[in-house]
């Protein structure tokens, strides 16, 4: 643990509020803050104690009445000496406090610099550090749970342990290179193979979770498609409980995509209403239909809505076949349930060979069943509710896949009896990816890139 030059920043959201918190961290943070503080001598106070007093200008005039909370190294977020100054949430007061701190030698913090110092001081690894930003940005129960799991160690601790075992094997393989002419084998090949297989067994569920994790973090792009007058805009309005889209009996009313968000079971769905799929009657409608097709290609989930009252069996079968051909996860939703018989429903499901969610968008019937089907189709509940690790970060995903590919090459190398130098090369690549993932191998550029995306006071 080491302490760097003192830094300070507003730790609460900018703007006028009842309370604001200015965080000071680094070498001499307590002594520097104490020069401005009138109350108890902060330098004599124990860690994790809060003290009422005033902060003063150079001439002794009062800037504000504050509460100064002392955290002594290494028992702080950054593992440095830290003082958190709780003041009134006036922008003027905040700027005056920061100005006085800078006069005493404190530097304004860069984005994410507090968390970066916590990482450098061993408070947590790089995956956990990135989870801090994800936790702050979480806007749903699912994203909150995923970020908390990562912050508590998630998968990174297990990977670090496996990486260390792999390092030991690589050292033995490279030792063999020094005895290349003597045909010795220090690294037991069967044990090495088993270790690589064990690592890959850990990697595969994480790699496969990325599509789910990405949806948790950024929302599930869910496009509602179907023929004109199927009730797509009515459905969107019913789900959102507001008149978001124009509803009309005239075919082709929706000519552009309309988007909004809906939270279901803690998951954010980005609902997209689109122009009806048909032969366009004019150039503007053609553009809308082209955008519909593009949204289908980009979506993570397709809701195909059809008018159960007026549908033609052959046209429905053709449309559903096209949806299936897109290889996107989808739901079939039959609208105008109140206008058809149970026999018609059963006949259509038998023809399609799968279940249909039956609703009446206009009457808002069975919308809860549709929401439950949407949630189940994304298949995130099990992973999130049980606290299983879910990969939400593309940097993590890239390193996980890079590790897996390198290990696959190394296993193939064992099968084909490659020389130790070729085997060692693939193992080094796997170690590099694992090390960069958890932060055991870093560069200044990498850290700057990661932490620059954080807010200033974190």
Image (cartoon, grey):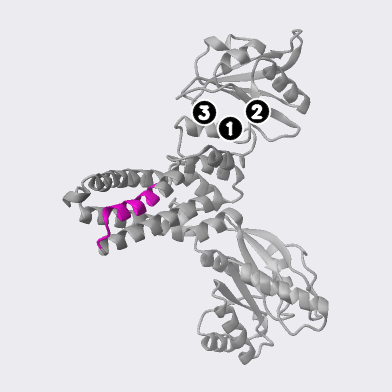
Residue found at x 45% / y 45%: 436
The quadrant in which residue 251 appears is bottom right
Towards the viewer: 395 or 214 = 395
The quadrant in which residue 372 appears is bottom right
> Is residue 274 depicted above or below 210 in this figure?
below
Q: Which residue is mark 3?
A: 78
Towards the viewer: 249 or 288 = 288
Q: Secondary structure at mark 3?
A: loop
The residue mark sitting in front, 3 or 1, is: 1
Task: Please indicate, yes or no, whether residue 341 appears anywhere in the rendered image.
Answer: no
Give the mark nearer the N terminus: 2 vs 3.
Answer: 2
Whether pointer 3 and pointer 1 mark residues with C-beta atoms closer than 8 Å, the reply is no
> Is residue 162 depicted above or below 81 in this figure?
below
Image coords of residue 104 (percent x, y): 66, 14
The quadrant in which residue 10 appears is top right
Q: Secondary structure at mark 1?
A: helix
- Which region is colored magenta? 417-431
Is residue 47 toward the left or the right of residue 230 in the image? left
Taking the magenta stretch, the answer to whether it contains residue 120 is no
Whether pointer 1 and pointer 2 mark residues with C-beta atoms closer than 8 Å, the reply is yes
Taking the magenta stretch, the answer to whether it contains residue 426 is yes
The residue mark sitting in front, 1 or 2, is: 1
Q: Which residue is mark 1?
A: 113
Residue found at x 73% / y 32%: 17
Q: Which residue is mark 2?
A: 9
Towards the viewer: 230 or 195 = 195
Towards the viewer: 421 or 340 = 421
């Amino acid at each position: 643990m080491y302490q760097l030059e003192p830094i300070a920043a507003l730790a609460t959201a900018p703007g006028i509020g009842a309370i604001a918190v200015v965080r000071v961290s680094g070498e001499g943070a307590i002594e520097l803050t104490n020069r401005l503080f009138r109350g108890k001598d902060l330098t004599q106070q124990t860690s994790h104690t809060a003290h009422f007093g005033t902060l003063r200008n150079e001439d002794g005039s009062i800037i504000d009445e504050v509460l100064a909370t002392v955290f002594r190294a290494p028992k702080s977020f950054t593992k440095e000496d830290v003082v958190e100054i709780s003041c009134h949430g006036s922008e003027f007061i905040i700027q005056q406090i920061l100005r006085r701190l800078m006069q005493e030698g404190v530097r304004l913090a860069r984005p994410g610099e507090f968390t970066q110092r916590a990482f450098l001081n061993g408070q947590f690894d790089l995956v956990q550090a990135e989870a801090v930003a994800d936790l702050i940005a979480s806007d749903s129960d699912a994203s909150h749970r995923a970020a908390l799991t990562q912050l508590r160690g998630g998968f990174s601790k297990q990977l670090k342990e496996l990486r260390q075992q792999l390092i030991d094997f690589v050292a033995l393989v490279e030792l063999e290179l020094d005895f290349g002419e003597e045909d010795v084998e220090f690294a037991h090949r069967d044990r090495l193979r088993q270790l690589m297989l064990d690592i890959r067994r850990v990697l595969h569920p994480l790699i496969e979770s990325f599509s789910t994790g990405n949806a948790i973090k950024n929302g599930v792009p869910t496009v509602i498609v179907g023929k004109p007058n199927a009730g797509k805009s009515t459905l969107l309005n019913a789900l959102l409980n507001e008149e978001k889209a124009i509803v009309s009996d005239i075919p082709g009313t929706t000519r552009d995509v309309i988007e909004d968000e809906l939270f279901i079971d803690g998951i954010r769905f980005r609902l997209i209403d689109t122009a009806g799929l048909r032969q366009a009657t004019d150039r503007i409608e053609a553009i809308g239909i082209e955008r519909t097709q593009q949204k289908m290609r980009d979506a993570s989930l397709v809701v195909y809505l059809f008018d159960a009252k007026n549908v033609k069996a052959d046209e429905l079968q053709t449309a559903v076949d096209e949806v299936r051909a897109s290889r996107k996860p989808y739901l079939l939703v039959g609208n105008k349930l109140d206008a058809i018989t149970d026999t018609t429903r059963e006949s259509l499901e038998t023809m399609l060979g799968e279940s249909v969610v039956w609703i009446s968008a206009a009457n808002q019937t069975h919308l809860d069943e549709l929401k439950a089907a949407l949630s189940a189709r994304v298949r995130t509940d099990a992973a999130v509710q049980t606290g299983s690790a879910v990969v939400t970060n593309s940097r993590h995903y890239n390193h996980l896949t890079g590790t897996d590919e390198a290990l696959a090459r190394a296993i193939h190398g064992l099968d084909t009896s490659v020389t130790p130098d070729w085997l060692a090369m693939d193992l080094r690549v796997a170690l590099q990816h694992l090390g960069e993932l958890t932060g055991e191998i870093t560069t200044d550029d990498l850290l700057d890139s990661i932490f620059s995306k954080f807010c200033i006071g974190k």
